[in-house]
Amino acid sequence: MLERFRANGGEAWFNCTATNILFDEDKAVRGVETTCGTVETKYILCNMNQNMVYATMCPPEVVPERMVKLGNARTYSARMFVVYMGLDKTAEELGIKDYTIFLPTSADTVKEYNDGKTIADNCNQVMVCYNVVNPGFSPEGTCVVSLTSTFMDDDWANISQEDYVETKTAFAEKLIRLFEERTGFKVTPYIEELEIATPWTMCNYVNVPQGAAYGFELKDWDNMMPRMMMMGTEFPVKGLKFVGAASIRGDGYNSAIFSGDTLAKKTLAEMKAEEA
Ligand SMILES: Cc1cc2nc3c(=O)[nH]c(=O)nc-3n(C[C@H](O)[C@H](O)[C@H](O)COP(=O)(O)OP(=O)(O)OC[C@H]3O[C@@H](n4cnc5c(N)ncnc54)[C@H](O)[C@@H]3O)c2cc1C
């Protein structure tokens, strides 16, 4: 995707943080301040969570009250927890043939959703073994397996800094134990490296509120249909549109990409209309 973007004249800046959005006297976008310099532009397609942007990157007077109310009415979607394990056995030796295995505890989605709210009750997980699709992912004779669990509430906010390491270690151990019990695969004796990422980690490194990499929860009043139907009012600040996980299509890679496609086309149409 990056190669294609560059081939079409796009420019990507890495290791660069957008810090502020600049506005003209009509409260329309006129640029972005970044740690690599200021970019002058009248159009921004932003894939950060909009609550973060309105709260930390815009002066309060440009943010319509409706967006503050919308931000307060919405709840966040899945908050992520991942255990990454570097194992000194190959996937074949461990008996793992699948790239990914979803391991809910039941087919009762209401129960799964409710159990996913707390650290005590959450037992859902998804295994991914990267070497199954990319044998060169790790050195010969090894493989990497991750176990991902999703939280449907902000229970990690209830953990104190003092208890953090103990809590994340205990939850990671629970996931590994449940994984072994449910699948019959043995991984514990072969762990060479282990890294744990919690919602705090996601919040810190990906800059997503509460560690919610899936944007806002989809609800009866706030799902893809109303968001798409209200695209005009969903982005009331002139020049500022939101794409990605917290945008019109909801969560996931495909939705993130398609929201970018839809809103880039809408922006191009606006640019053309302005030129005419
Ligand atoms: C562990 C895990 C497993 C997942 N599994 C799946 C799956 O199996 N299937 C699926 O469809 N989806 C999955 N997802 C969700 C998917 O990753 C997201 O929906 C998707 O990446 C969202 O894309 P995005 O562009 O909106 O945001 P991101 O991919 O989060 O990209 C936003 C980027 O912006 C950067 N950023 C933040 N603030 C600033 C700033 N101020 N200046 C500059 N840069 C900034 C962040 O560092 C980040 O790189 C998973 C997510 C996680 C965390």
Image (cartoon, rainbow, N blue to C red):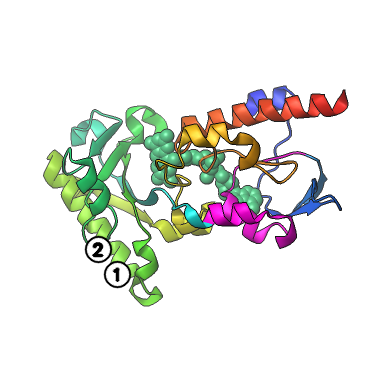
Q: From what the image shows, is residue 106 above or below residue 166? A: above
Q: Residue at x 32, y 37 (%)?
A: 128
Residue 60, visible in the rendered structure: yes
Q: Residue at x 86, y 53 (%)?
A: 25
Quadrant occupied by the C terminus: top right
Residue picked out by circle 1? 166
Q: Is mark 2 within 8 Å of ligand 1?
A: no
Residue picked out by circle 2? 170
Horizontal side of 254 relative to 122 (left or right) equals: right
Residue 43: horizontal and vertical position, in percent?
76, 38
Secondary element at tag 2: helix
Question: At label 2, which amino acid type do we have?
Answer: Ala
Q: Which mark is residue 201?
A: none
Q: From what the image shows, is residue 170 above or below residue 273? A: below
Crowding at dot 1, Cα within 10 Å, few <14 / some 14-19 / many 20+, comes out as: few
Residue extending farthest to the bottom is 162
Question: At label 1, which amino acid type do we have?
Answer: Glu
Which of 64/91 is in front? 64
Residue 1, visible in the rendered structure: no
Question: Is 229 in the magenta?
Answer: no
Question: Is 67 in the magenta?
Answer: yes
Residues rendered magenta in the picture: 43-71
Residue 188: horizontal and vertical position, in percent?
20, 51
Q: From what the image shows, is residue 186 above or below residue 10? A: below
Given contact means CB atoms under 8 Å apart, are the residues at marks 2 and 1 in contact? yes
Q: Residue at x 46, y 42 (%)?
A: 222
Horizontal side of 59 relative to 91 (left or right) equals: right
Residue 107: horizontal and vertical position, in percent?
17, 37
Horizontal side of 65 relative to 274 (left or right) equals: left
Residue 271: horizontal and vertical position, in percent?
79, 29
Secondary element at tag 1: helix
